[in-house]
């Protein structure tokens, strides 16, 4: 299964963070120390990388994350799924209180080969266009 989505949130902070501060806030510190640990009751983080990316003219963090999920599918109680997420998390260049998170995610059974979707995910992550118009933020994340 492959999912793509865009979420936007109002951080409540109208000042622009430095790129280093934005990266620090996104990662919450040293995420690599969390690799191998449970991040929810059913999810274990098995890989994470994040780096600054200014290719869209905004302060962004390009990230990839791998999680292992157990007990997600009641009909398949023994199934262990892998979620591979590639994303781009940006501070809107004109409205810095708004943060945009583009995600391209693939879910597959552990032991199966992941699909090669690098070109598709890269095209999707580069597709965001920032305008000077104030974004409208829903109270809850929009459905993918």
Image (tube, rainbow, N blue to C red):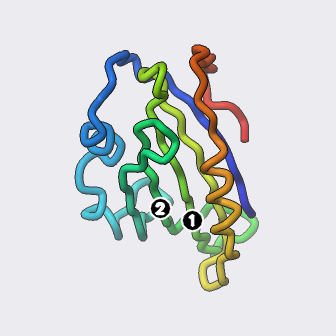
- Name the foreground residue: 130 vs 110: 130
**Residue drawn at the location 56% of the way across and 30% of the way down:** 8
- Horizontally, residue 143 falls left or right of residue 45, namely right
**Residue drawn at the location 51% of the way across and 48% of the way down:** 88
- Horizontally, residue 113 falls left or right of residue 132, namely right
Q: Earlier in the sequence, mark 2 or mark 1?
A: 2
Image quadrant where one finds the C terminus: top right
Q: Is label 2 in contact with label 1 (beta carbons under 8 Å)?
A: yes
Q: Which mark is residue 65?
A: 2
Q: Badge 2 local density, few (<14 within 10 Å), some, or many (20+)?
A: some
Please tell me whether mark 2 sits on a helix, a strand or a loop: strand
Q: Quadrant of residue 23?
A: top left
**Residue drawn at the location 40% of the way across and 55% of the way down:** 39
Residue tagged by mark 1?
Answer: 84
Q: Position of residue 54 (x, y in %)?
A: 43, 45
- Horizontally, residue 140 falls left or right of residue 2, namely left
């Amino acid at each position: 299964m492959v999912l793509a989505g865009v979420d936007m949130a109002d951080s409540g902070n109208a000042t622009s963070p430095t790129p280093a501060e934005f990266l620090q806030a996104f990662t919450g510190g040293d995420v690599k120390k969390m690799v191998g640990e449970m991040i929810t009751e059913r999810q274990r983080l098995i890989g994470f990388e994040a780096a600054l990316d200014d290719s869209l003219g905004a302060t962004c963090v390009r990230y990839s994350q791998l999680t292992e999920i157990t007990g997600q599918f009641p009909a398949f109680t023994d199934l262990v799924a892998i979620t591979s997420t590639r994303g781009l998390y940006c501070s809107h260049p004109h409205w810095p209180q708004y943060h945009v998170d583009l995600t391209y995610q693939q879910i597959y059974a552990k032991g199966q080969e992941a699909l090669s979707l690098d070109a598709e995910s890269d095209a999707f992550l580069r597709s965001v266009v920032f305008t000077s118009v104030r974004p409208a933020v829903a109270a809850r994340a929009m459905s993918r």
